[in-house]
Amino acid sequence: MSDFYQVLGVGRGASSDEIKRAYRRLARQYHPDVNGNDPEAAERFKEISKAYSVLADPEKRQRYDTFGDAGVDGYPAGPGDPFSVSFDDLLGAFFGSTDPFASRPRTRSRARRGDSIGMRLRVEFTEAVFGTSKDVRVRAAVACDRCGGSGAKPGTEPTVCRACSGSGQQRTVRQSLLGQLVTATTCSVCDGSGREVLSPCQQCRGQGLVMQDSTLSIDIPAGLDDGSQIRYPGRGHAGQYGGPPGDLIVELAVDQHPLFRRDGDNLHCTVRVPMTVAALGGSVPLTTLEGTELLPIEPGTQAGTVKRFRKRGVPHPEGRGRGDLLVELAVETPSQLSEPQRVLLRQLAQLRGEEPDDAAAHGSLFARLKGGGH
């Protein structure tokens, strides 16, 4: 027997696509329909078909590579007689996805996967951070209870499609320079299923589906942010004619928090600290997502100081740890002072050598002259 790789003109490392392209090129050249039933061309075409039937099959190719001719002895030349494949079928293989040795067009299942449902759900800031469960209202297609989802009137069944005779395809034939050119397209009446509903169900109008409102309970994982999308498999529209359901896709709209700003998995907030506490030290209330606690303030704390609290931020969506909480301290300067408070502050300023401007401390020169001061 000849070396199958040499017959097709490809190397032993050739890919399946390279093998298929080589076969199509040679088959078009040596097909009996093109060569007027020339015996040599017919023999050559038979040899090409034998080589392709082995090398195009991964299992047969592996046996051939391992054992040579002995590994494929007893195998037929292909799934069928190569001479039963017309040149029209080969042309279909060149310009489409048809395998010339494949069986004749088969109908496809009527079952259709259901469409997905998309919705936007508003949640509170803390719900998005820690996760929650929600009940949502959806309007989705469900199987018709009157016909059981078949689309046919109760007491009837879908029949063989009259347009394609159950093949699922409609074929058109036209003449070309090389002979008849056959084009196969999906039947527009049965959508390729080969089955036609002659007496549609009145409730679903032959679709097998009806719309229905329902309430679904969904879990929202912790750590998701505004705009995050969650996919819930199988909770969308029901499939048509027994097909699998689609998915429910929920996009989160997260409310802003009055205190916290999110940056990835970290949280930022600002805490106001009285001037005296910043100078002398002490503590101020700190609100976190878990509650309120006291925040220690070291003596001499400056405005803009940032304190980092590890693992007090947003949980990682993958469930491993949390981000941090960053607290910026804003030192408050009093804007309204009583006279005793002003006296004390002046004394402090004198002790520190930071006496304020006389005009600011005692009023303007114009005010003192008006009051008769010297």
Image (tube, rainbow, N blue to C red):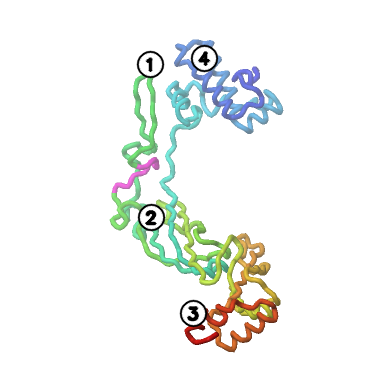
Residue at the extreme bottom:
340
What range is drawn magenta here?
190-198
- 3D distance between C-alphas at marks 3 and 2: 94 Å
- Mark closer to the observer (1, 2): 1
Residue 277 lies, in percent from the top left, at 65, 80
**How many numbered tags mark residues here?**
4
**Is residue 295 visible to us here?**
no
Q: Which mark is residue 42?
A: 4
Give the class, few, some or many, for how many residues have Cα within 10 Å of label 4's Cα (few <14, many ≥20): some
Q: Nearer the viewer, mark 1 or mark 4?
A: 1
Q: Pointers 3 and 4 in contact (CB under 8 A)?
A: no
As drawn, 184 above or below 188: above
| Overall secondary structure of the magenta section | loop
Q: Amino acid at mark 3?
A: Phe
Where's residue 328, x and y in %?
Answer: 62, 69
Residues at discs 1 and 3 in contact (Cβ within 8 Å): no
Q: Residue at x 54, y 61 (%)?
A: 225
Q: Earlier in the sequence, mark 1 or mark 3?
A: 1
Q: Tell me the residue that label 1 is attached to.
A: 177
